[in-house]
Image (cartoon, rainbow, N blue to C red):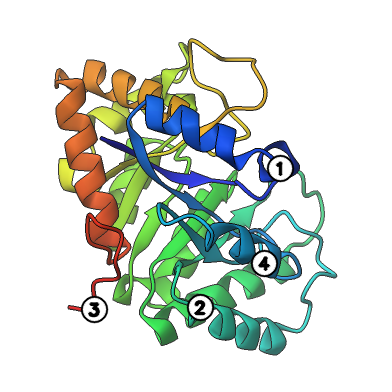
């Protein structure tokens, strides 16, 4: 079986057709998916959607790309993160992190927001889901400064090099590869995918974005296509597809403290 460890099922592309999405997942043997939260204001709608489906889970967070004015009060943000993290199907804090790609001015507000998410993860004991784009040095520095190794988490949609992956692994993080690893020119990402220890490896779609080869350029991406990510990792590591599915599924359950039946593991 396969698990999509990061997607966005509450986005308009999916929210009204989850039955269709689930049918495609079933046909591809994709058994579970985690829908990552990106806004506090819309989290109640995400949770209402997820709790209708036993094989779906979610996280709570405020994406670094969301405007500075959203939850500018980090104290209030921390309170909201802690409140929603207590819900039974919320298995992680995030999507959080740093994204300097579209930013041309000072982004201390992003860094403060990121630190707040780390504090929430440490307070709840739930892992972090970290977004890192054009901000590798600052992301890793803040994770170290805030003691994120106490809870760990996952570097989602990993697009950096092996050195960055190794630094994140040292902090107790898992590395998750999306459809980008299937792209022909993604040499550094492919190298990282070859070298990440098997017990720290995850796969995802980040759907509706980043459709993998052979669907590259198609929109929307969907959780069923996480199998193509697994196929590329199997090729890169000279493993069977079944083994990639088995290993990454076991890693998902371990990181998010779930059992293979989807129940919360409190041990």
* Res 80 quadrant in image: bottom right
**Which element is circle 4 on?**
helix
Find out whether the residues at labels 4 and 2 contact each other: C-beta distance under 8 Å: no
Q: Label 1's element?
A: loop
The residue at which mark 4 appears reads as: 43
Please provide percent x and percent y for residue 131: 54, 52
| Residue underneath mark 3 | 266
User: How far across and how far down the image is residue 223, in percent?
Assistant: 49, 34
- The answer to which of marks 3 and 1 sits earlier in the sequence is 1
In space, the residues marked 3 and 4 are separated at their CA atoms by 24 Å
User: Relative to residue 67, is residue 183 depicted above or below?
Assistant: above
Q: Residue at x 15, y 20 (%)?
A: 240
Q: Marks 1 and 2, Cα distance to the nearest angstrom? A: 25 Å
Of labels 2 and 3, earlier in sequence is 2
**Dot 1 corresponds to which residue?**
16
Say whether residue 170 is visible. Answer: no
> Is tag 4's residue or tag 2's residue first in the polypeptide sequence?
4
Q: Residues within 10 Å of mark 1 (few under 14, many from 20)?
A: few
SS class of the residue under badge 3? loop
Disc 2 and disc 3 in contact, CB within 8 angstroms: no
Quadrant assignment, res 91: bottom left
Q: Which mark is residue 193?
A: none
Q: Which mark is residue 85?
A: 2
| Percent position of residue 42, x then y | 73, 64
Q: Nearer the viewer, mark 3 or mark 1?
A: 1
**Which quarter shows the C terminus?**
bottom left
Q: Residue at x 41, y 83 (%)?
A: 124
Dot 3 crowding, Cα within 10 Å, few <14, some 14–19, many 20+: few
Q: Earlier in the sequence, mark 3 or mark 4?
A: 4
Q: Quadrant of the N terminus?
A: top left
């Amino acid at each position: 079986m396969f698990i999509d460890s990061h997607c966005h099922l509450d986005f308009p592309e999916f929210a009204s057709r989850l039955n269709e999405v689930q049918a495609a997942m079933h046909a591809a043997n994709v058994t579970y998916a985690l829908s990552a939260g990106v806004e506090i204001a819309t989290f109640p709608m995400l949770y209402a959607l997820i709790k209708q489906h036993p094989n779906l889970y979610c996280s709570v967070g405020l994406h670094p790309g969301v405007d500075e004015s959203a939850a500018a009060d980090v104290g209030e943000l921390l309170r909201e993160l802690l409140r929603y993290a207590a819900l039974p199907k919320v298995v992680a804090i995030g999507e959080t992190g740093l994204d300097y790609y579209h930013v041309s001015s000072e982004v201390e507000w992003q860094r403060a927001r990121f630190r707040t998410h780390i504090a929430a993860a440490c307070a709840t004991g739930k892992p972090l889901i970290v977004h890192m784009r054009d901000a590798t040095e600052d992301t890793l520095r803040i994770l170290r400064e805030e003691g994120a190794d106490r809870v760990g988490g996952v570097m989602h949609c990993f697009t950096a090099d092996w050195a960055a992956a190794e630094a994140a692994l040292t902090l107790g993080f898992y590395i998750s590869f999306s459809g980008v690893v299937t792209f022909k020119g993604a040499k550094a990402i492919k190298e990282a995918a070859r070298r990440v220890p098997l017990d720290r490896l995850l796969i995802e779609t980040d759907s509706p974005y980043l459709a993998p080869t052979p669907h590259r350029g198609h929109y929307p991406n969907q959780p069923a296509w996480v199998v193509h990510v697994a196929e590329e990792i199997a090729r890169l590591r000279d493993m069977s597809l079944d083994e990639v599915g088995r290993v990454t599924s076991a890693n998902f359950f371990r990181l998010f403290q779930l059992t293979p039946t989807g129940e919360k593991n409190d041990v």
